[in-house]
Amino acid sequence: MNNSYVILSGATFDLPQSVIEEYGLEVIPMNVRLGEQDYLYHPDEKELSCKEFYSRLRAGEESVTSQITPVVFKEVFSRFLKEGKDILYIAFSSGLSGTYNSARLMADELMEKYPERRIVCIDSLCASVGEGLLVYLAGKLRMEGKSFDEVVEWVTENRARICHWFTVDDLIHLKRGGRLSGFEAAVGTALKIKPVLSVDPEGKLTVVAKVRGVKKGMDYLRERLLNDGINTREQTVIVGHADSPEVAEQLKEQLLSENLVKEVIISNVGPIIGTHVGSGMFALVFLGENYKF
């Protein structure tokens, strides 16, 4: 492993703690307010577990998140710079948050103080496990001994190849986020219609299809893998879920039994993203050609 630099991202990237530890990835925990309580969400769930979060969300408690502040970026970046390490920060999509711009501005400020060090902030144009796949693949390259510049180049050139496909169960959260109208949410809920979403080239969420039921949703994600994926039998893909472990396992088994992919990582979608998609969401992300909506 090349230890001269760190790969860093926020708690939006929804990778399992075991993967984070295996590849030496660094995570900035993020704030979430659930009901009347404030938590700092870490991927190891030491303050708030995904199980508790979704249980309370289904019980009617409201959740609110906030993006990483410049003060936090300064504290985290400075810690690694003082250790003599360069920083590759892979940011949550700028199409969904101002986090990337905050990180970039703080990086510019700190590089004046540490001119011998480098901080590169890359807008992933991704969210949740899509962002996670990009960070994971960057971590693999670092594990193989690739240089800072080589990983920066790879992430920059390949971020647009991350294909994100997911469906949600609770349409109310999408309505609150402005992704569906009140009428669409009401009709969809009554008819048990699940919108299928992706991320467009600007990193913004887009509703691309509507299916009825979990099985149809799984079939649709599988078809996108077949249509858009490149050399998927050689790929590690990620199946993410928001308190839907049975669905995630079914999708994993289907992909492996049909020999469509090399490996599947199943990951919980944490409270930061879960606030905006609700329980019941499941996703499939892979490398391919983006997109044919």
Image: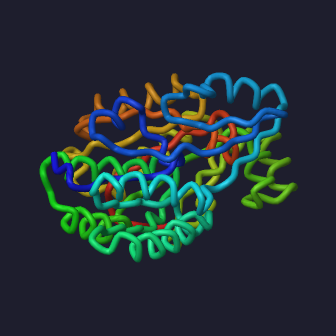
Residue located at (42% from left, 33% from top):
16
Residue in the image at 41% along x and 60% along y = 90
Relative to 60, 4 lies left or right? left
Q: Is residue 218 or residue 44 the one in the foreground?
A: 44
Identify the colour scheme used. Answer: rainbow
Horizontal and vertical percent position of residue 57: 76, 31
Tally the marks.
0
| Of 194 and 13, the residue lying toward us | 13
Nearest the camera: 266 or 85?
Answer: 85
Q: Is residue 150 above or below residue 185?
A: below
Q: Quadrant of residue 178?
A: bottom right
User: Looking at the figure, which quarter contains the N terminus?
Assistant: top left
* Whole-percent x, y for residue 38 in the image: 74, 36
In the image, residue 228 lies at what x, y percent?
36, 59
- In the picture provided, is 59 more to the left or to the right than 240? right
The residue at the point 49 percent across, 29 percent down is 44
User: In the rendered image of this protein, does residue 242 appear above or below residue 94?
Assistant: above
User: Between 71 and 211, which is closer to the camera in this rendering?
Assistant: 71
Q: Position of residue 238 (x, y in %)?
A: 39, 41
In the image, what residue occupies the spot 48% across and 65% down?
Answer: 125
Would residue 269 appear left or right of 224 to someone viewing this image?
A: right
